Image (cartoon, rainbow, N blue to C red):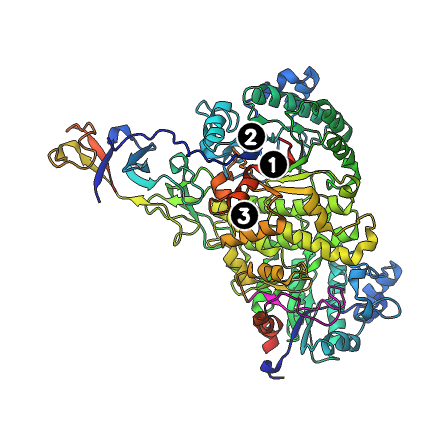
Amino acid sequence: MNVNAPKAQFRPNNKLALVDCDIHPRLRKPEDLKPYLSSRWWDTWQTYGLRKRHGFVKGHPYPKSQPGDGARRDAWPTNGDPAGSSLPLMQEQHLDYHGVDIGIMNPLWPGSGDQNLDLSAALASAHNDWQLDLWHAKEPRLRPSIVVPYEHVEASVAEIHKRAPNKAFCQVFLLSRTNEALGRRKYWPIYEAAVEHNLPIGIHVFGYSGIPISNSGWPSFYIEEMAEHGTACSALISSMIMEGLFERFPTLKVVMIEAGFGWVPSLGWRLDKHWQKMKGEVPHLKRPPSEYLKQNVYVTTQPIEEPEKPEYLVDLIDWIGWDRVMFASDYAHWDFDDPVFAVPPNWSEERRRKLRSENAMSVFRL
Amino acid sequence: MNLSDIRAVDCDVHPTVPSMQTLLPYLNDHWRETVIEREITTLDTISYPPLAPLTARADFRGENGRAGLDASEVGQQALDKWQADIAILNCLYGVQLVFNEDMAQAFARAVNDWVVKEWLDRDPRLRASIVVPLQNVEHAVDEIERCAVDKRFVQILVLCMGETPLGRRQFWPIYAAAERHNLPLGIHAGSAYRYPVTSLGWPTYYVEDYAAQSLGFQSQLASLVCEGVFVKFPKLKAVLIESGVTWLPGFVWRLSKFWRGVRAEIPWIDRSPNEIVRDHFRLTIQPLDTPDDPDIVARAIEHFQSDDMLLYSSDYPHWQFDGDEIMPPGIPAGLHRRILVDNPLATYPRLGL
Amino acid sequence: MAKHIVAAVKELPPGSRKLVEVNNRQIAVFNVNGEFHALGNRCPHEGGHLIDGKLVGLVESKMPGEYCYSRKDELVKCPWHGWEFDLRTGRAQCDPSRVRVRHYETAVVQGGEIDLDAPPKAAEVFPVRIEDDYVVVEV
């Protein structure tokens, strides 16, 4: 019979290992967190909702291009649960299908950056328990991140100390749009704790700082919001470098997640060029800014850059360094990347090996 | 001068307003008294602190540490020295920062009139951009109409960080006037300081502040493209002045990639932003944020996939390079003439009139 | 070009879709208001499966601020990156001259019209009943 309903097709096993640096597990429903929250914080959350720095009770100031906070249309479980909330579907559709050996969970959690710092701290801690119990315990390929209430630095530090002894946790997880640039000293205790436990800092784009996402005010469109992640992350990395964070913590590793990386080489060149003239203002920097970029900062592939000529992508990675770039899929979001597309087969095996797994194994000590 | 004899067109030279006293003759009685009585001593901005190293190259600074104070000084230091037969003046006095829109209008007129009388009238090689008070669109259009009569004004000048993204429709009468008078929209580094200069707040150091200027250009490029300004005004060109340059390909690839998936949000954009940007955007070459390795510079320039986009600038008196080598190493020799002459002439129709 | 029966019409009512495999090619078949459309299932960008895509209308514009909506449900939006493909041509809305997915002609035939002695491909194994109608894809 040559007409039939095709069965799920599995990709032929790729002989190279694969670490996915950006997987988004999602709450099936708020009640999943209830066991990990005191009645006070459960009630506050349910009664008053979140107080992030934008105006809508639900949804986003820039509505996304598809439902489920911008989920892949094919990642919804048939029972109607949210995309990304079903472990069996994630296993079948992503971990098995793409041959993911280790996947790092980056929960885009309700309560991140909340104005109510104590609520944010409670929700962060609850998400860490939730990652362990509902995901990692059932699927050891999935590794949790230490979610911290980054605007509440003291609570963030406590959470890092609490979770770090569990070696399943592989990074401290922040969002990019914070109330101040992440290089500012306010946040340094978080980095100090991370360094103490040898944990990288993973910074995923998004979050709400309340500050306009362009420095000329609020743009009109979602496409502009998306394009502005690179500018925010440029400011973020500039801040970390110029504040001297990497002089103070030379072993700190910062991983930029879902920020793209087309902006990285130019940023390094620009900072070097202008630092050269204005060193006098930042005497605490002992080396050109791009050297800190090359020593302390890593980037993930997704959403992969798509220049008009593929060789320009190779140029970008040549300039950033083949040991600085790590594969990420962003499952289950719409701008997901297939590992074979992001790290194409016509690149040398050595390069593919680095991007698919070796760089991440080293950064996250997997 | 025959156009074919032109050796270089310097598309970004900054006349420095020596002091508020200089502008008093160009203000009416009310605003002159206001300036004195309310002690408005300067509109210099923190984008260029007068003594910061970037603000003026050491060999251009006079006894008081300032540079570019009059037409003869600029004529010798920027035009004679680097063989520019035409130079475009972009005055960065902080008119755009003023909150009172009537005051902003008065200062814009004063600056433009001062540029005519004390610069354009004194050196025939000089051209200028029209400083417009974006605080009020009608005022901005009026100022364009008032100045455009003088063909030595060759573009309109705004800052890369303002109060509202430049693509928004409220600004469109300005672009209609620009198109009508063959004036490109010149967008220069600088901020009206309505918001923090980064989307993550106010940076600690000036060097971060200056580095963040290139982010402002990225936002404005996205806004102008996505809002459909070039659909409505197909003849309009935007010139990104003192933008840093090398950020552009990566940013536009990103915009183009997302556009393929979310184009229904902006359905008037019916071709890739990659193409729109190549057709409508131009960039001045200083600063050219590149490393020392000329091979990398050449690759970074190749990523533009266009020979038409780069325009020569010295950015005088800002300190962007040392010595007299005006063409950054690594730019292919075959592009030099285009950058120095052909592209500026094609971008600024009024230079050929 | 050979015709392949891929479904009985009553199995594929308006608003429904079916993924079929013909000669090792995966084909997404959609019924939009009683009209059948067939496209290759694999998005030429990163390989998302169009069978899982949302059907959308065509929004076009001549000028900023204008939104001309037409052809409801006649484009399929890739479930991954949202590229829209025209069900009638397979062309991508973002770059119609260069990007397309394979488009297949479809037809409806009555069971009684099918010549069982010289059957279309698949007919010998597809249970054909004279009283039913069938969707045919040309491959």
CB under 8 Å between discs 1 and 2: yes
| Magenta stretch holds residue B312 | yes
Badge 1 and badge 2 in a common chain = yes
- Look at the numbered disc 3 and give the secondary structure of its residue: loop
- Alpha-carbon distance for marks 3 and 1? 19 Å
- Alpha-carbon distance for marks 2 and 3? 23 Å
- Look at the numbered disc 2 and give the secondary structure of its residue: strand
| Residue A2, label in figure | none
Locate residue A165: give its quadrant: top right
| Residue A360, label in figure | 1
What residue type is disc 1 on?
A: Ala
Question: Quarter of the image containing the N terminus of chain A?
Answer: top left
| Magenta stretch holds residue A294 | no
Main SS class of the magenta portion in the image: loop
Q: Circle 3 is placed at which residue position?
A: A305
Stretch in magenta: B308-332
The answer to whether B155 is drawn above or below residue B243 in the figure is: below
Q: Residue at x 75, y 35 (%)?
A: A191
What residue type is disc 2 on?
A: Ile
- Please name which of the two marks, 2 or 3, marks the residue nearer to the observer: 2
Q: In the picture provided, is A30 more to the left or to the right than B210?
A: left
Residue A235 visible in image: no
Ranked by sequence position, the earlier of labels 3 and 1 is 3
Image mark 2: chain? A
The answer to whether C137 is drawn above or below residue B11 in the figure is: above
Ranked by sequence position, the earlier of labels 2 and 3 is 2
